[in-house]
Amino acid sequence: MLPIAVAVTGASGSIYAVRLIDVLLDAGRELHVVISPAAAQVFRDELDPHLDVDAFRIEDYLPSSQIGKHEVLERYRFKDRNRSTAAAGERGQLHVHHHQNFHTGIASGSFLTGGMVICPCSMGTLAAIAGGQSANLIHRAADVHLKERRKLIVVPRETPLGPIQLENMSRLAAAGAVILPAMPGFYQQPTSMADLVDFVVGRICDQLGVPHALFERWGDSESAAPTN
Ligand SMILES: Cc1cc2nc3c(=O)[nH]c(=O)nc-3n(C[C@H](O)[C@H](O)[C@H](O)COP(=O)(O)O)c2cc1C
């Protein structure tokens, strides 16, 4: 199994990133993670008001952390629904890279990956990638995934969307990226924020080909209902 690149940027929805990273590690996947400075600010605003953004370490917020900061996420009450499908029970390795470190593997096409996810993806990062800029490691790794024709999954979060943002998404889709907006469906009858987060994270896992049990699939039960 090839490693997966995960970028976290300063759009709303920090919880999606924490849950995605935890689920992928639980599924035994090796991860190369990059976090933008704005992502740390949003993390403080949304999840931990006591966070020192200059000392932010996403690993401290994962359930496996000894630091215990993951307790600030308890209000989401995630069930460990993925653990039943974790590959051989072996947790994957986590590498976190500085956003300006262009010496790391994911900055080069010669470093093989099983794909890249940007979750959540800000409109700023979206524009930078659509414009072919490589001002930080996130833009550069995304550019590499597109040029190498590897899977790039972009999870934008903004509303409403203007023509520039829609054009940028369209450009990335034309270049081969999967645009997977942070838009949870409600036909799964969610009863918690955790259900809504897991819907989006599960759809990202589907795109990566990572097995999960984060939601019940449409058609798996006999109950009535909707479209897609
Ligand atoms: C609390 C908070 C929420 C934000 N939410 C969004 C958002 O949902 N979408 C977005 O595009 N930008 C959002 N921003 C603005 C971005 O963080 C900002 O444009 C930043 O420059 C993005 O940088 P990055 O792409 O390098 O992470 C938010 C900022 C803050 C402080």
Image (cartoon, rainbow, N blue to C red):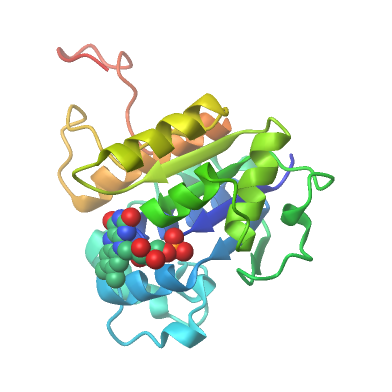
Q: Residue at x 41, y 56 (%)?
A: 124
Left or right for 79, reference 222: right
Q: Position of residue 187 (x, y in %)?
A: 18, 27
Q: Position of residue 110 (x, y in %)?
A: 84, 45
Which quarter of the picture shows residue 40?
A: bottom left
Left or right for 167, reference 56: left
Q: Position of residue 35 (x, y in %)?
A: 52, 66
Q: Quadrant of the C terminus?
A: top left
Residue 189 shows in the view: yes
Report the front residue among 194 and 81: 194
Picture quarter with ligand 1: bottom left
Is residue 227 depicted above or below 99 in this figure? above
Q: Residue at x 73, y 55 (%)?
A: 107
Which quarter of the picture shows residue 162?
A: top left
Left or right for 121, reference 77: right
Left or right for 149, reference 35: right
Residue 88 shows in the view: no
Is residue 144 depicted above or below 169 in this figure? below
Q: Quadrant of the N terminus?
A: top right
Q: Residue at x 15, y 44 (%)?
A: 191
Is residue 161 depicted above or below 57 in this figure? above
Q: Residue at x 43, y 80 (%)?
A: 68
Is residue 90 depicted above or below 137 in this figure? above
Q: How many marks?
A: 0
Report the front residue among 216 and 116: 116
